[in-house]
Image (cartoon, rainbow, N blue to C red):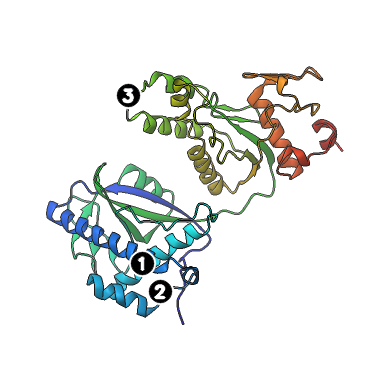
Amino acid sequence: MIKKHTRKHVNSIRRTSRIYLRDANRSKVEELKNFLNLYQNVVNYYIVRFWSPEDIDENLATKEITKSAQERFEITARLSQCAAKQAKEIVRSQNEKSKRKRRMPRFKEKTANLDGRFVKIEPFNGSFDMCLKFGSGVPKVIIPFNLTKHTNKFIDDGREMSNSIRLGYSPKKDGLFVDLIFEKERPPVKEEGKVIGIDRGFNIMLVTSDGQFIGEELKETIKRGGKRRKSWHHFIETEAYRYLKGLNLDNIRLISLENLKNVKRGKRGKFSRKMNRLLSFWIYSKVGERLKQICEEKGICISLKNPWKTSQRCAVCGNIDRRNRRGERFLCLSCGHEANADYNASKNLEALGLAGVYSLRSLPTLSTVEYFSI
C-alpha cells in the first residue's frame, strides 16, 4: 500500500512565521547552504521524472524511483522520498493550469520542506530561546535562534507549533532562514449576519457597501515615494496591510468581492509612463489574499463576483450607462442618484451577493430596491 500526501490537522488554519538565522555559526550556515543546493538538484531531477500524465496522482513515489535518486545523489532514503513528495506537488500544481500555460516547471528556490523526521524544535539552554536539531540526511548541526515578536504573537494566540519547518536560503536578502508553521482550529462558518460588497480600486484601496473607505491616503503616499526608491514597494505593501486592519467586519457573514484576476492583461502601452509606475503599486492581489486570511479566521465567506459594469450601473434604479460615471463621481442620468463611484460599485456588488449570482447579467430587470423588498 502506497501512502498518500496527508496533513496531520486537515481542518486547520496554517500560518508561517519567518525567522532569519543571522546569529548562526558560519561553518554551520555553509553546511546547510550546500545541503539546500543539493536538495534543489534532487527536486529538479524528480520534476523531470514526474513530468508525465501517469505520475500526477496523490500517491507517494515508489521505492524504485526514490532509490535511483538515492544512489545518484548519495542521499538517504527518507530525504529522497521527501524531495520526491515536494517535486510531485510542484508537478501537480503545474498540471492544474490550462494547456496553453502548462510548461515543465523548474525549482529555482533554495528551500526544503522538512518534517519531524529531519528536524526537532526544542528549547535551548543558553542565551537563545529555542534551537533546531537537524539529522537523518540533513547535516547534523544545532542552530539556536530567538523568537520574534511575530512568532510570539502566534504563540500567545494559542496556535500550535507544527513539527515541520521550511528551511531556505535567500542570497539577495538576509541569508539563511526558517519558516515556523503554526496551526489553529478553523472556526465555524457564520450563518447569521450581513452581506456587504467591497470594491477594490487604485484611488481608494477598499470601499464597502456599509460606508467604509479603507486606504484613502494610500495613493498620495505612493506619489511621494518617487521612482528611484527600491524599498517603496515593500513599504506600500506594509501600509496597505496596516490600513486593512481598520476594516470593521463585525456582524458580517458574507463579503461580495469583485474578481480582478488578469485585470491588467492587455493594458501595456495604453497609459503614460507615469501612470504605469503608479499602477505598479496597485497590489490588489496581495490585499485580496490578506483579506481572505482575515475572513478565514473570523468564519466569514468571500464570494468573488464579475466586476462587469458595476461602476456604470446605478445601484438605485439599475440603469447602465458609461456616462453615469465621471472619475470618482457617479451621477445617474436616469434617476439622478449621486454618490461616490466606488461606493456605488460596492452597492452593486452587495446586490450580487444577496441575489447569489456572479454577474450583473443575471440580475432581474427590476431595480435593486424593488427586487430585494419583495
x and y percent of residue 59 in the render? 47, 73
x and y percent of residue 326 in the render? 66, 17
Secondary structure at numbered mark 1: helix
Secondary structure at numbered mark 2: loop
Of 374 and 309, the residue lying toward us: 309
Q: Identify the residue at image location x=43%, y=30%.
A: 239
CA separation, marks 1 and 3? 41 Å
**Residue where numbered disc 2 is placed:** 61
CA separation, marks 2 and 1? 10 Å
Q: Residues within 10 Å of mark 2 (few under 14, many from 20)?
A: many
Secondary structure at numbered mark 3: loop
Pointer 2 with pointer 3, Cβ within 8 A? no
Specify the amino acid type for callout 1.
Answer: Tyr
Frontmost of labels 2 and 1 is: 1
Specify the amino acid type for callout 2.
Answer: Ala
**Residue where numbered disc 1 is placed:** 46
Of 276 and 313, the residue lying toward us: 276
x and y percent of residue 263 in the render? 56, 36
Specify the amino acid type for callout 3.
Answer: Arg
Q: Identify the residue at image location x=78%, y=17%.
A: 336
**Which quadrant of the structure image shows residue 324?**
top right
Frontmost of labels 1 and 3 is: 1
Quick check: 45 left or right of 367?
A: left
Q: Identify the residue at image location x=78%, y=18%.
A: 333
Quick check: 89 left or right of 354?
A: left
**Residue where numbered disc 3 is placed:** 228
Pointer 2 with pointer 1, Cβ within 8 A? yes
